[in-house]
Amino acid sequence: MSKRMSTIFWVGFPVFLITIATAGGIAIYRYGENANNPEIVDVAASPVPPSPEPTTASEPDRAELKVQVLNGRGIPGAANEAKKVLEDLGYKDIATGNASSYDFNNTEVATTKDKADYLELLIKDLSDTYQATSSTQQLEDTNDFDAVVIVGESR
């Protein structure tokens, strides 16, 4: 090997090693910084898949419920007023009539067993206008209606 090649080798080789060592040190330093900083996350390198979006339970379809609204106040038109409230919320199949008595203080809601998932929805829908509560009795599955609302005093 010539003297000139030997000089280039002994000067270039240490420079090469220093360059590699410096680049490695910088890479290790940056990796350590990112590992300790929770704000900097390399999502592409993350082996954990992103969590799925939370799903919300869908509300029952108001239009599918057959409702009977009964006047339990004795004030003419009370059942029709409640019918209008329910229609404005999307209920479609609503019949009105009079309750067996007119001494209801609260508006009572009852459903059949197979439509029980509508009970809380009906109470919530009526609660802005009426003091709605769940009836103490459940409707028979043979009832002509899925739900019965007996209108009591309004708020």
Image (cartoon, grey):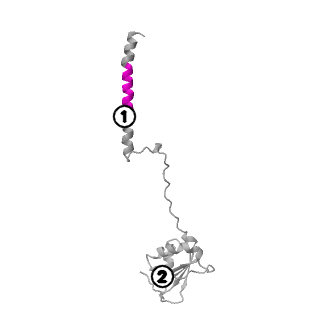
Q: In this picture, which residue range is highlighted in magenta?
A: 12-24
- Label whose residue precedes the other's in the sequence (1 or 2): 1
Kind of residue indicated by mark 2: Thr
Kind of residue indicated by mark 1: Ile
In this rendered view, identify the residue nearer to me: 34 or 133.
34
Residue to which mark 1 is pinned:
26
Residue to which mark 2 is pinned:
107
Q: Secondary structure at mark 2?
A: strand
Is 23 covered by the magenta stretch? Answer: yes
**Label 1 crowd (10 A; few <14 / some 14-19 / many >=20):** few
Is 1 covered by the magenta stretch? Answer: no
Location of residue 95 with respect to 50 vertically, above or below: below
Q: In the image, what residue occupies the spot 37% across and 40% down?
A: 32
Task: Locate residue 95, reporting x and y percent.
Answer: 56, 80
> Magenta region's main secondary structure?
helix
Q: Image quadrant of residue 93?
A: bottom right
- Any part of residue 3 in sight: yes
Spatial separation of the CA atoms under disc 1 and disc 2 = 73 Å
Q: Which quarter of the image is occupied by the C terminus?
A: bottom left
Q: In the image, what residue occupies the spot 55% across and 69% down?
A: 61
Task: Locate residue 42, reporting x and y percent.
Answer: 43, 43
Task: Locate residue 125, reporting x and y percent.
Answer: 48, 74
